Structure formats: C-alpha cells, structure tokens
Amino acid sequence: MVEASCELHEIGTMTLQGLDESHQALDQLKADCRHAAKSVVSDLVVGAVKVVETAQWIHDFLVFEQEIVDLFAIDPASVSAGSDTLKQAEADMEELLKSFDTCLESMDVVGVSDLLGGPVPALLTRFQDLLVILRAQINDSANG
C-alpha cells in the first residue's frame, strides 16, 4: 500500500512539473503560430513547413492535456476560469482545427494565416489560464 502511495505521489509530482513546463511552452507555441502565420503568406514552402510543425505541437499539447484529464479522472467542465471551462476550450479548439483543416484542404493560405495569427494563439492563452486551475485541482487531490 505504501509503495502504491509513493508511485501515485511520483505521478502527481511529474504531472505537476509537466503542467508547469506546458504552461511555459504554450508561450513559445503562440509565438510559433504567429511566425507560421507570417511565413505561410511570405514564402509558401517555408511557411508550409512551419505550419506542419506548429500543427504537430498543437496536437501534442492536446494529447498531453487529454491524458492528464483522463489519468486523474477530472471532468473538463469542472476546470473553470471565470465563465470559461476546459471543456469549452477543448470544444472550441476542435472547431478551430476543423476550420484549419478546411483552409488547408482548399489551399486558403490567407485563412490559415488568419487562424494562426489570432484565434489559435488566443485559444492557447485560454488553455494557459485553465492549466493553472487544472494544476491546482491535481495538487489539491494529491495533497488532500
């Protein structure tokens, strides 16, 4: 029983560290989005590479966030900052990614640039705010 408790504590500690690093990494991801937005309209080849790299980082973040929610059995609707919830941010990201896919499929470079230049970084800021709340919930459950 003590061994399981120690393992759970280690998982909690590693998760909290991962959330701290993710919070900081989202600042870089927002900058990368803005850079990709500018690149894709100025040099399609270079911009396309940046868009793909940025899309992969967004995907990786979303997988990480979902794994944490699943691991700790947290209801995304319970993670809220003001009137915003993690559940709503996830739904908004899903819709934004659908719009992103539509732009890519139709080769709408301006649409891709517009999404990466504004709505995507704004949504990542919302995730940053919500990660603070998620971190606190995990910390409270680990110490409570």
Image (spheres, rainbow, N blue to C red):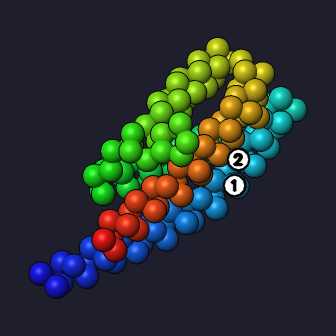
> Which residue occupies the extreme right position in the image?
42
> Which residue occupies the extreme top position in the image?
106
- Element type where label 2 sits in the image: helix
Q: Are marks 1 and 2 in contact (CB under 8 Å)?
A: yes
Q: Where residue 79 appears, x then y in whole percent?
A: 43, 47
Task: Please state which amino acid type lies under the numbered disc 2.
Answer: Lys
> In screen coordinates, is 9 left or right of 114?
left
Tag of residue 19: none
Q: Where residue 65 appears, x then y in whole percent?
A: 44, 51
Which residue has dot 1 on it?
A: 27
> Which residue occupies the extreme front position in the image?
82
Q: Where residue 15 appears, x then y in whole percent?
A: 42, 67
Q: Residue at x 53, y 38 (%)?
A: 84
Q: Indicate the quadrant where residue 97 lies.
A: top right
Between the C-alphas of marks 1 and 2, the distance is 5 Å
- Element type where label 1 sits in the image: helix
Which residue has dot 2 on it?
A: 30
Q: Where residue 28 appears, x then y in whole percent?
A: 70, 55
> In screen coordinates, is 61 left or right of 42?
left
Q: Is residue 34 above or below residue 95?
A: below
**Callout count:** 2
Q: Residue at x 70, y 47 (%)?
A: 30
Q: Can see residue 90?
A: no
